[in-house]
Image (cartoon, coloured by chain):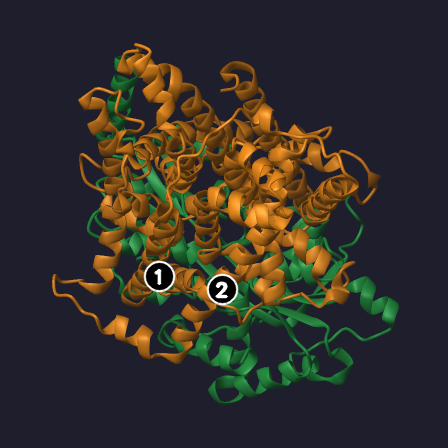
Chain colours: A green, B orange
Amino acid sequence: MRRLLLLALVVTATVGCFAAPASPASAASPTTITLVTHDSFAISKSVLAAFTKQTGITVKVLQSGDAGAALNQVVLTKSNPIGDVFFGVDNTFLSRALDAGVFAKYAPSSLSTVPKEYQLDPSHRLTPIDHGDVCINYDKQWFADKKVAVPKTLDDLTKPAYKGLLVVENPATSSPGLAFQLATIAKYGDDGWRDYWSKLRSNDVKVDDGWESAYDGDFTQGANQGTHPLVVSYASSPPAAVYYSKPQPKTSPIGTMLDSCFRQVEFAGVIKGTEHQAAARKLVDFMLSEKFQADIPLQMFVFPARDGTPLPAVFTKFAEVPATPLSLPPADISAHRDAWIAQWTDTVLR
Amino acid sequence: MTASATTRGLPRAARVAVIAVPLVFLAVFFVYPVLAIVGRGLAPRWSVDLDPLGEVVTDAGLRHIAWFTVWQATLSTVLTLAVGIPGAYVLARCEFPGRRLVRALVTVPFVLPTVVVGSAFVALLGEGGPLASLGLDQTLGAILVAHVFFNYSVVVRTVGSLWSHLDPRPEEAARVLGASRLRTFREVTLPALRPAIAAAGAVVFLFTFTSFGVILILGGPGTATLETEIYRQTAQFLNLPLAAALTVVQLVAIVVLLLLTSWIEGRQRVSLSLRAAAETVRRPRTAGARLFVGANLALMAVLLGVPIGVLVLRSFDTPSGFGLDFYRALGEVHAGSTLFVEPVHAIANSLRFAVAATVIAVVVGGCAAFALASSRRRGLDALVSLPLGVSAVTVGFGFLIALDHAPLDFRGSWWLVPIAQALVAVPFVVRVMTPVLRAIDPRLRDAAATLGASPARVWREVDLPIVARAALVAAGFAFAISLGEFGATVFIIRPDEPTLPVLVYRLLGQPGPLNFGGAMAASVILMGLTALAILGIERFRAGTVGSF
């Protein structure tokens, strides 16, 4: 009996070490490719199944952390790639991803269906798949009840009427937080943005670590029914607030301050060194196909990059999209990002 | 002399195995990955560059972060021990109706994902919350309260498991000889409990030292610890040299702490005379005793019950009145998406990972506990606890670059998740089992041997019942840890098999009442599952192992 127990111990220990090479990751058959992505990636299972049916290629999805963490894992494993395709580089990480040299050149033929403004990689290694806007959302009811005018511009937010009403996320720990900081840099320039944040600070802006704390915790329309009727969130939050309610309201309880929006574009690319280059390219093609693009809005609550993709009713009815969102060249973001975050921390938190 | 202990009756091969299993496991799944990622940071081209370490020492901001990390962990540990030790006594020694249920329930907070608890605390302490007037929102105070909430059960269970078996007669003798209650506690009980208290304190310190979600959500935006900074430098900036330097600082601090506790534990290694729990438990007889029990139960109800109550309430509090809408929504809202899973599948994934992690943790941790109980091996003692004190992101990224070649090509395998969870659980298994194993009175064995029992029979009849009981308690802990574990999992690149905590986290990341309510509902399911698992194990242990 005891010998049996011992045997079991030894077997457990050895199996742990040596059974591994049989795991699916390394023994992938030619028709299975690996898509590496962040934790927010979502698509309908039926859409992925359609890809498999159409091409014979099975897609294994590997996820790890947020966009930054997932991309950095791909950069780290450059000499021994962990997958074949990566989805989820956004424009704030674009230059770093390209400089790291982890993506192979590939321009899908359907790239022509994507508006030029989203084609931010002239070297054609990263393909735009979706876009969204980080914007300030406001609680319609709150402003109506208090008979306060909804703020229109970023300047308005520094006025006494809006003191203590805005909650933002820390750019050091939050992607929408960083996007909003970039919006202010795009708007006020290198010389003016710190001054603007000093004024926001004097006007009692609240800073949270992440979107969940800000939206669910402090926003008046969030789950906690907080005390801040203005929050940094997304242009897709008004439709999401309707879509994820039961029963669904006739109008969205929240609105978007269109002057505050910063455009985010998300890219996919073939990982350099993949053994399944042809299959990997097919997956990137598929991500730009009508079927995949039409599935994006209700899965990830962002907008499809492909022109003319039909939007679900909840988007056409409730989403307001800025005509000219704020933006910055990816190379600038990459060059200054760390310094900007450090300066922001000095200005707002110290 | 008493080095005799627990492994003496075992064949030589077994004695080698009890040391080899934990050493090999930790070498492959902890030491090697961490060395790989630290090495990539500090010695990228085979030449060691220690400048980043210098930066940590000279940069005032980084020095402050290191200091704050140690400071908040020390405060949290002291507070948790102060609140937890009386609780351990009440649950170990005092008989009252529903004791077993309470003992299972206090473990629930420990396994809750920090994002969920964070949101419950924000709802209570934040602006507009019922306890906003305490002014704890975004302060060190909020961090401390949350740390006590999470770690209370570590003290209650680690200290309580020894306390419930402590022979009450020396205390009774001291009382009869005229010692006051306080003096008896200080001079008789406390020395006997010291190993367990040191063990619990060390675990709480390690946990709070590397606390991540609590610091971010409750500490406010200016608050940073080594753990949050390593995360930022690794996951956001890919500044591996600085991350590696911070990891080295983390390791040094932990090794110092572990050597210190190991010294406290080892300084006085008494062989205690252990009794069956049923023999030591007393019904509180005096009014004072009843008041003490009542006060502790009230404290548990407030500290642990209120935040959990908030979660449960919110899972039913739908926009259209109280109901099950959020539970139903779990299965409906995101049907057909790769991102979301049927709750049944999330439960199944959670259970599968938890069983795998428990088996690994009990085998590895059990072996280590035997090795540690039979003779002092400070190195091994410190080694098994190290994973608790090292950043999850360091281990996750280390897996990625270290376990990528045959025969260790584990990348993308679901096994990495239970292995990472076992790394967190092993120290608990060791710390629950070792004090009990160490305290087995060698005279019991000697007596059995004198009466003619073979070494194998001595082991089977003296050691095994005690070992089995300790192993079950440890298994319950490991299972609970694995069920709720999220931090170590999130940085492992893994196939899409979401567990309940992952589901909660995903739901919280989207706006709208159905997502938030769904997250609360999934958390309540997770809590229920944990409470059931622990109740089941307690029942099993009472039923089959019997008393000794």
Q: Nearer the viewer, residue B257 or B104?
A: B257
Count the labels in the image.
2
Image location (x, y in percent) of residue B370: 32, 31
The residue tagged 1 is B253
Label 1 secondary element: helix
- Residue drawn at x 81%, y 69% is A143
- Mark 1 is surrounded, within 10 Å at the Cα level, by few (under 14), some (14 to 19) or many (20 or more) other residues, namely some
Are discs 1 and 2 both within one chain? no
What subunit carries mark 1?
B
Which secondary structure, mark 2?
Answer: loop
Tell me if I can see residue A306 in this picture: yes
Residue on which the image places disc 2: A173
Vertical placement of A126 versus B522: above or below? below
Cα distance, mark 1 to mark 2?
Answer: 25 Å
On the image, the x and y values in percent for residue A13 come to: 26, 28
Most extreme residue toward the left is: B46
Foreground pick, A51 / B252 = B252
Give the residue displayed 66% in from the left and 40% down from the top: B518
Do tag 1 and tag 2 residues touch (Cβ < 8 Å)?
A: no
Q: Residues within 10 Å of mark 2 (few under 14, many from 20)?
A: many
The type of residue carrying mark 1 is Ala
Q: Quadrant of residue B496?
A: top left
Using residue B314 as the reference point, say whether residue A141 is left or right of it.
Answer: right
Three-letter residue code for mark 2: Thr
**Chain of residue at mark 2:** A
Q: Nearer the viewer, residue A317 or B329?
A: B329
Is B355 placed left or right of B36 in the picture? right
**Vertical placement of B519 versus B544: above or below?**
below
